[in-house]
Image (tube, grey):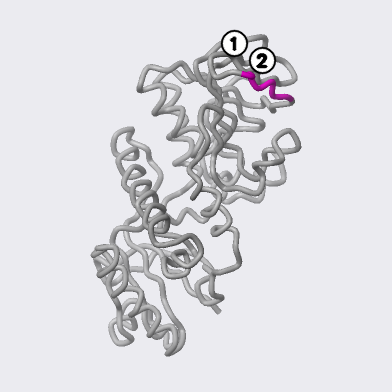
Amino acid sequence: MSDADAQNFYFATTAPPLPHAPLRGETRADVCIVGGGISGLSAALHLAERGFTVALLEARHVGFGGSGRSGGQTIFGYASGQEKLEKLVGAADARFMWDIALEGMKLQRELIAKHAIACDYVAGHLHVGVKARHDAELRAEVESLHETYGYRSVRFVGHEELRTIVPSERYTSGLYDSNSGHLQPYKYTLGLAGAAARAGVKIFENSRVTRLDIAPRADADSLVHTKAGTVRARHLLIAGNALLGRWCPSSRASSWPWARTSPPPKCWARSARARSSPTTPRWRTSTGCSTISGAPPITGCCSAGA
């Protein structure tokens, strides 16, 4: 067990899954995916369901990276908020990113139901403010989401109602979203891996990529090498995020997966910069996630800043 695993509550409280063998020798696939997190596993599952053969390489074990260690919050939009996002990337791209985020939340719930993934999903998220300025901003955000984005699952929670939900004088108002929620991210990632394996995906753990030989033409195979084997594939998807290492340095600054077969939309680069920019107000920084009880249907996550 690594130090990262030892410090991961989700890993420590989840029954160990059956391991996947490391890659040995050469194997062929239509698509090779690098990274055994949510992005890589979801892509592998969908490709296999469409008839592609898929080989997935994971340097450690499924869910080792951020996918198995995140806060588990499945929340609408982006940390910067849509208003700031519009200023960073423009209204059209901000809407495009918004639609992607909502589609991802919907797909996540569909995958949980379709593949019976036991990941402790709880619907509902409450974002709370601690001062008058926050109250005004939360109210304005609700109005903007209603009017500009047609997002009707959010509502403003005033101080008196909030006190019946969270028995504290510290919080002054809240934004509640019934479409958001929380799950156990490591269990969800393992559930995706199980579904992908049942669909025919070959998953190789402890198979760190050591070298990429990218094909010079789209109709030729790329070679993905590990210490003990090689995957030969026509298509390549890199889904390793911050843990990719030196062999793929150009993608370390981006949060988006990278595909060999086609360039990403131009707005992806701007979106990645927006996501990494320090635009999140201090009060919006999550200090934890807890289940709020006593006021159904407002149950789920509560995030607040100092």
How far apart, in angstroms, are the residues tagged by discs 1 and 2? 6 Å
Quadrant position of residue 165? bottom left
Q: Amino acid at mark 2?
A: Thr
The earlier-in-sequence mark between 1 and 2 is: 1
Q: Where is residue 175? Give x, y as percent.
A: 35, 73
Q: Residue at x 43, y 26 (%)?
A: 196
Q: Residue at x 56, y 36 (%)?
A: 258
Residue at which label 1 appears: 27
Compare residues 226 and 166 and report the one nearer the observer. Answer: 226
| In this picture, residue 47 sits left or right of residue 33 | left
Q: Where is residue 195? Give x, y as percent.
A: 40, 28
Q: Where is residue 104? Give x, y as percent.
A: 38, 46
Q: Residue 215 lies in magenta, yes or no?
A: yes
Compare residues 149 and 15 and report the one nearer the observer. Answer: 149
Q: Amino acid at mark 1?
A: Thr
Mark drawn on residue 230 = 2
| In this picture, residue 273 sits left or right of residue 178 | right
Compare residues 8 and 32 and report the one nearer the observer. Answer: 32
The quarter of the rendered structure image containing the N terminus is top right
Establish if 173 lies above or below 252. Answer: below
Quadrant position of residue 275? bottom right
Mark 2 Cα-neighbour bin, 10 Å: few <14, some 14–19, many ≥20: many
Q: Residue at x 69, y 24 (%)?
A: 212
Q: Where is residue 35? Give x, y as percent.
A: 58, 33
Q: Are marks 1 and 2 in contact (CB under 8 Å)?
A: yes
Residue 199 visible in the current orientation: yes
Mark 1 Cα-neighbour bin, 10 Å: few <14, some 14–19, many ≥20: few
The quarter of the rendered structure image containing the C terminus is bottom right
Q: Residue 214 lies in magenta, yes or no?
A: yes
Magenta residues?
Answer: 211-216
Establish if 209 lies above or below 288. Answer: above
Q: Residue at x 42, y 70 (%)?
A: 83
